Amino acid sequence: MRISTTARAAALGLGAATLMLAGPALAQAPDGVRIAAILEPNTLDPTAGAAEAIDVVVYQNVFEGLTRISETGAVEPALATAWTVSEDGLTYTFTLAEDVIFHDGTSFDAEDVVFTFERIRAPDSINAQKALYAGIESITAIDPGTIEIRLAAPSGQFLFDIGRGDAVIVAPESAANNGTTPIGTGPFAFVEWRRGAEVVLERFDSYWGEAPALARATYLFIPDIAARVNALLAGTVDGTYNMGTQTLPVFLNNPRFKVLEGTTEGETILAINNAKPPFDDLRVRQALNHAIDRQAVIDGASGGYGTPIGSHFAPHHPYYVDLTGTYPYDPDKARALLAEAGFPNGFSATLKLPPVDYARNGGQIIASQLAEVGVKLEQINVEFPVWLEDVFTNKDFDLTIISHVEPFDIGIYANPDYYFGFDDAEFQGIMARLNRAVDDADRRALAEDAQRRLAQEAVNVFLYELPQIGVWDARLEGQWTNAPIEGVVLRNMRWAR
């Protein structure tokens, strides 16, 4: 799992007086880039954390996998330069890149791949996507440059899944310290993490692949939207991968900047604790769905940017089904369902909100809409580490707002121990068949069934798909417009000469 820790919507009340604080642009060092990141990661090891903020810094920059995901969402070779698949779809044989070293000088070979996947699958693994790799039956080093992975059942997603940040290759010599001193094989090496301020990366001169144009990248953590605007206008940062929508007029007509509007895999949801009364009652969950006006949430929390969704699936995916009409906005129907469930006067609940604009702003709108049908919410603002511990880990919540930004992550609902607490044998059976399917028509039909089941069960209130709106120095090239996977990939960035 990756949950969005970026501020996808605008902070309210950003006044002209604030913008006037910005001074003239500063001179840009010709070989480096400074990127404004919204939240600071709690670790720099993507195999040991659930926050998008981790991959923003290290995915495809410091760490690499056997495969990698392109801006179009395609699977590309990475540390595995080629592979073959057996006729039964169970055995993958990978040819590994030659002359690869980790940033500490240790060599990369097949044993590192074995170590990585055995570590992911170990009983004490804390990998956020451990379930994705449970279908690996065996992993064998044929020789230093060849690895064989055998699956228990065919998987149409396997090559994609091993290209995620959760499956980057790590070395036994350094894995234990990757949280604070990450050592990978990527084009950039970790230099420094100044807690509360920035992470600095530098080009790795012994990189095995094509050398990046940038010599240095600095991620500056600037959670306040007004401060990010000022930093861009003053030239103390060169861009940000996702900017609040209400600030865009400041940049749209300014020739110093370019605004890139793209798509993400971020399903923004009002997440419901299905295992906790009264939310274990389908009628209560249906009532919450009928009580929410999605478009009002999009307009108020995301400046009108974003696509309404009715299930946990990205609208740009070819398997998408529009299920937004399953529970149309109908407060009267919501009140009737609550009365039928034994709550004619409604009830009280808590809404825990992480420190991102789409959650805090959306929370106010949703609390107001639910109050109209008698559901009174106590809004509790929490910092992100607290959200991870209370909500994601300990399941100590009633409702929360979060964006899930991993691609094709509908399978999280098949895990009854996941923080939603959704335990449904029918959905689990659909996903088991989908995970085994390799024929595209079969996969499409099963993915559609999975979406419909989640919508029917009103597992969460599915709100909208996040946009990605980057604001960058107009001279900087090679940034990704879209976000088919988490990360701010540096390899193609360069300054126009």
Image (cartoon, rainbow, N blue to C red):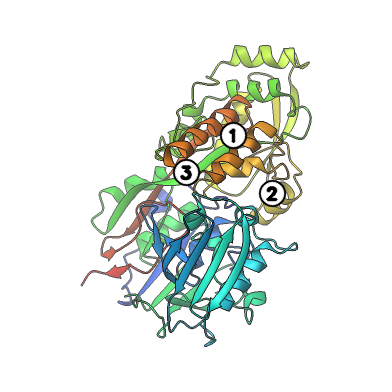
Where in the figure is residue 315, as x and y percent of width and height?
42, 36
Q: Name the residue furthest bottom.
A: 105
Camera-side residue of 16 and 351: 351
Mark 3 and mark 1 in contact (Cβ < 8 Å)?
no
> Tag 2: Cα neighbours inside 10 Å, few (<14), some, or many (≥20)?
some
Badge number at residue 417 = none
**Residue 13 shown left or right of residue 182 in the figure:** left
Q: CA distance from mark 1 to mark 2?
A: 21 Å
Three-letter code, disc 1: Gln
**Residue 390 shown left or right of residue 92 in the figure:** right
Badge number at residue 392 = 2
Q: CA distance from mark 3 to mark 2?
A: 22 Å
Three-letter code, disc 2: Phe
- Secondary element under disc 2, as helix, strand or loop, is helix
The reply to whether residue 11 is in sight is no
* Residue drawn 47% across the image and 43% down it: 9
Residue 253 drawn above or below residue 311: below
Mark 2 and mark 1 in contact (Cβ < 8 Å)?
no
> Tag 3: Cα neighbours inside 10 Å, few (<14), some, or many (≥20)?
many
Three-letter code, disc 3: Ala
The reply to whether residue 463 is in sight is yes
Which quadrant holds residue 480? bottom left
Where in the figure is residue 12, as x and y percent of width and height?
49, 41
Camera-side residue of 478 and 229: 478
* Residue drawn 70% across the image and 63% down it: 125
Q: Which residue is label 1 attached to?
A: 364
Q: Which residue is label 3 attached to?
A: 9
Q: CA distance from mark 1 to mark 3?
A: 13 Å
Residue 302 drawn above or below residue 70: above
- Secondary element under disc 1, as helix, strand or loop, is helix
Residue 184 drawn above or below residue 45: below
